[in-house]
Amino acid sequence: MNIANIGKLIQEKATSESNVKQTEITEKEILISNHLITLLVELSNSDSYVIETEDSLEHSDHIDPDPDYSIETTGEEEEQVGHCDFTLEYMQKVVDFARPGIAFTTIQHEYPRVTHRMQLKRFREYVENNGNRRQKLDRVEIFVLNKFDDARANSLPVHEVDIQRWALYQARAEGLDDFTASHHWLINFKRRNRISSRRVTKFICKREAADRSLIEKSGDQFVQEVTKQLPKYKLDVVLNADQSSFHYELASNRTLSYVGEKTTYLSVKSVNALTHSYTVMPVISAAGCLINPVFICLQEPTGRFPITKSILSVSNVVVTCSKSGKLTTSLFEYWIREVLNKVTNSRFLLLMDQWSPHTDITAYENNLNRGQTCKLMVIPGKTTSTKQPCDVYFFRQWKELTKRIYHRVALDQLDVDLRNRDAIIKLQSLVHNQLSSAIFRPLISFAWSSCGYIPQQYPEFLNVIEVCFSFKLDNCSENNCGESAFICCSHCRRTLCFEHFFIVYHFH
């Protein structure tokens, strides 16, 4: 029977049913009906049309071609026997109890979940095989994860082939002879345990890796000692100072460029300036304040500033120099007199690292001349990255702001040489001034709380990028200035171009 005959039969059947309410058929409805019937007849007699089909990439839920695939579960694994789930431990208890001569009714009375005799047979099979496949795969994963944790705890390199090798070893011990540690299993293992390839950022010797637990313990003990002393001081006079080196030219080690280029070049004014550095030494308090002034030690070939040229003088910078650009014992004593001596005229608590001039209490006693009492506490070695507030997050913000200035000068090819003395002093003065704003107090306080010295004072805070470089206004807010905005001042919240910020010296 063709499609046309089917259409006519349906029409006749519909009109002949006695229980169908008859309505008057309009001329328009008759025309539409005839048109549809004609289309059906043409389709049934035509061989030119194509039926489109759609292929799906989805697989059936109950089919997985990978023999290493295992369903992710949490908690204690259970095996379904009949319509009930049983753990391997539960089945072991039932099997141990069901000794020869024990009636099944007695077993049911002791273990009500056992409802029929066939379950006992299944229990014995699973216990004899030490669990089902899923449970064995779980034990393989636990074994591999333990091996991975041990390796990384000792700072040893681990690669994908090592994970697969450990998995295969344990699979053989579990009797999973068909387990292959496939790429599919490896990807799932890494995803479940949040494991990924990471670039090595620091190399340490084997002895240091072995002593890391002792180092962490000494750091924690130091934090406990500091917290015992804190109630005796106001947070404004709980201080931390540290040195940080800055290259005379800061260049980004990443850039956008074209895919496929063999060598990516970056232009700098002086390659030599990328390796020579000077020292910046700020002081921060546990109250979240950046102390004024900041100490800078520049590098001079003779160890002295030339007497023929004056040095830029600004209110928030104390500047000195040495042949290396690093502090010496005498320059550190100069820092005590010119910076630390101006912080307070009462007793204060000072956290310093283990550099030998830092730990000499007599240096403080001989150079503090305002009657101050310094309680010096020395941060244990190799713990400064986690226990020194300046190192924890704060210096990163300082250098981010500094790099933004260098980047704008380089990209726009501005006629500014940030390698000379006055430019460096002006740059570090502006950076110090921006970070001295009250808007950054939560950020500095976070550096202390993340070390564990004080409870977190502020639930949220803004970093340098969010405060100074995230703004909607594209133009400089100075009158009659059409230049694009470079920075949003942390004090007055005005957007400024590079000239009105750096050249004009926007200082609060």
Image (cartoon, rainbow, N blue to C red):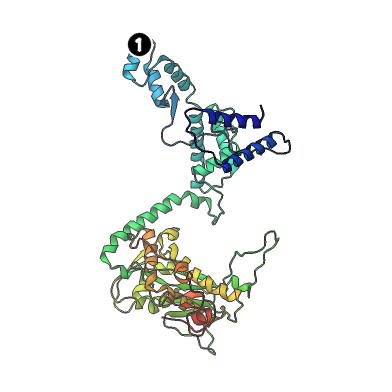
Q: Nearer the viewer, residue 191 or 153?
A: 191
Q: Is residue 62 above or below residue 241?
A: above
Q: Is residue 456 above or below residue 178?
A: below
Q: Quadrant of residue 370?
A: bottom left
**Outermost residue to the bottom:** 308
Coordinates of residue 182 in the picture (x, y in percent) = 60, 36
Residue 327 seen anywhere in this rendered image of the structure = no
Q: Secondary structure at mark 1?
A: loop
Residue 229 seen anywhere in this rendered image of the structure = yes
Q: Nearer the viewer, residue 112 or 429?
A: 112
Is 330 displayed left or right of 171 in the figure? Answer: left
Is 26 displayed left or right of 381 in the figure? Answer: right
Which image quadrant: the C terminus? bottom left
Residue position for label 1: 103
Q: Residue at x 31, y 70 (%)?
A: 236
Name which residue type carries label 1: Ala
- State the count of labels: 1
